[in-house]
């Protein structure tokens, strides 16, 4: 029998890849904003950062399953929802506070070019700005396929509305899938993925052109299959480890195949959007990394990279508001890499001084007196 993988032992690599995903999104947005001058080949390869967000959704399903599979029925869903709120809402609120002076500046100066370029709004924009703020505060942005709702304040917040939806259904989804055999779970994941493809085709052909891009890229239901595949991958990993079938060699094979497949799909993109065909390989990559019993690439287990991975959520949410602030301050495009380093540094500061302390305070100060668990799973979830 193979040596079982210790709980938390595989999560360093999974935490590290979060940084690469968040960095891909930031590089894409900085290029689109004119702060960086990366080649169009790069933007094409990463498809504007959209596949990186899909990787986040798959990883979210995997980590939540790994973290809560044995405790959700014991502790109840209420504790889970408090933990999810503590995980995402403080930084989400902080990102809106950072975006506040940007919005005030754009409105008060009457800069219609910035208002249109950054927020997809024209003059007299107070009503749509307020509607967008309300949607973001209630984590509903992705449900409104309108640029005037999605773009103002903090554009990447649309993905948080997807996460909030996934969190809402996760206890039910884990209970349903957890009661089925791995074969049935695999069939359900495949069926949901096929339905996603049919839905994307329907939207691409029959949705008005002004709406279909948002529905394909940002609508929560469009991305549900990615989260489901993450849950399915998590269940496979848990059961394989429990019966001693968690193979390091199989993990290396999954990683190798998935990296080659993702790279080829990113280059040739036989189907648009690119994330659709890539997402099953994201699930394979995550499963492969979790199956590793020892580091294959020491880079992914380096403490510095793990720290960046822990701060990736902050990086993802604050990079656009901070980029706007630096542009207002007059940072020239030839100093875009300085701006990026400032944002990365700020994300680490936010994680250590705001995100993590506030998360612990909400989970274990307000709600419970139980001590904070030390496992990496609880930090990644």
Image: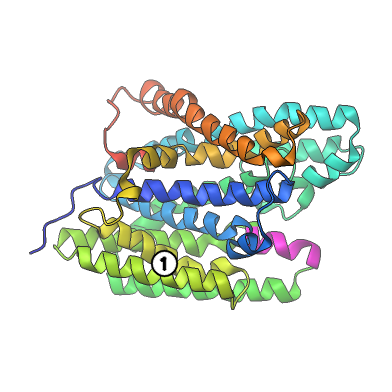
Q: Position of residue 230 (x, y in %)?
A: 40, 59
Res 178 visible: no
Residue on which disc 1 sits: 259
Residue 196 against residue 72 in the figure, above or below: below
Residue drawn at x 29%, y 46% is 73
- Quadrant of image for the C terminus: top left
Position in image of residue 167 (x %, y %): 47, 48
**Residue 244 located left or right of residue 171:** left
Q: Position of residue 196 (x, y in %)?
A: 55, 70
The residue lying at 43 percent from left, 51 percent from top is: 60
Q: Which residues are magenta?
A: 209-217
Residue positioned most to the front: 334
Circle 1 sits in a helix, a strand or a loop, which is it? helix
Q: Residue at x 14, y 63 (%)?
A: 243
* Magenta stretch, main secondary structure class: helix
Res 48 visible: yes
Above or below: residue 117 compared with residue 175: above
């Amino acid at each position: 029998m193979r040596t079982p993988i210790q709980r938390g032992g595989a999560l360093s690599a999974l935490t590290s890849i979060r940084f690469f995903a968040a960095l891909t999104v930031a590089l894409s947005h900085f290029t689109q904003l004119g702060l960086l001058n990366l080649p169009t080949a790069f933007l094409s390869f990463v498809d504007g950062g959209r596949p990186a967000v899909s990787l986040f959704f798959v990883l979210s399903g995997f980590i939540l399953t790994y973290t809560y599979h044995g405790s959700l029925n014991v502790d109840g869903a209420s504790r889970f929802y408090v933990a999810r709120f503590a995980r995402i809402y403080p930084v989400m609120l902080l990102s809106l506070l950072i975006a506040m002076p940007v919005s005030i500046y754009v409105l008060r100066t009457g800069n219609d070019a910035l208002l249109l370029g950054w927020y997809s709004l024209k003059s007299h924009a107070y009503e749509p700005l307020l509607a967008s703020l309300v949607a973001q505060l209630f984590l509903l942005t992705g449900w409104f396929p309108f640029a005037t709702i999605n773009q103002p304040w903090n554009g990447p917040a649309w993905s948080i509305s997807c996460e909030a939806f996934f969190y809402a259904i996760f206890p039910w989804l884990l209970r349903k899938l957890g009661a089925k055999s791995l074969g049935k779970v695999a069939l359900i994941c495949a069926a949901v993925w096929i339905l996603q493809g049919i839905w994307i085709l329907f939207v691409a052909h029959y949705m008005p052109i002004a709406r279909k891009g948002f529905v394909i890229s940002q609508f929560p239901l469009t991305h549900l299959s990615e989260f489901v595949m993450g849950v399915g991958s998590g269940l496979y990993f848990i059961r394989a480890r429990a019966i001693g079938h968690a193979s390091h060699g199989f993990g290396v094979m999954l990683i190798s195949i998935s990296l080659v497949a993702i790279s080829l799909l990113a280059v040739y993109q036989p189907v648009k959007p690119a994330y659709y065909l890539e997402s099953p390989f994201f699930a394979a990559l995550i499963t492969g990394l979790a199956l590793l019993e020892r580091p294959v690439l020491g880079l992914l287990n380096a403490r510095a990279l793990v720290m960046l991975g822990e701060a990736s959520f902050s990086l993802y949410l604050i990079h656009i508001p901070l980029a706007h602030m630096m542009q207002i301050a007059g940072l020239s495009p030839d100093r875009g890499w300085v701006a990026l380093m400032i944002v990365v540094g700020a994300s680490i500061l936010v994680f250590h001084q705001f995100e993590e302390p506030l998360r612990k305070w909400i989970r274990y100060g307000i709600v419970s007196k139980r001590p904070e668990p030390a496992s990496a799973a609880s930090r990644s979830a």
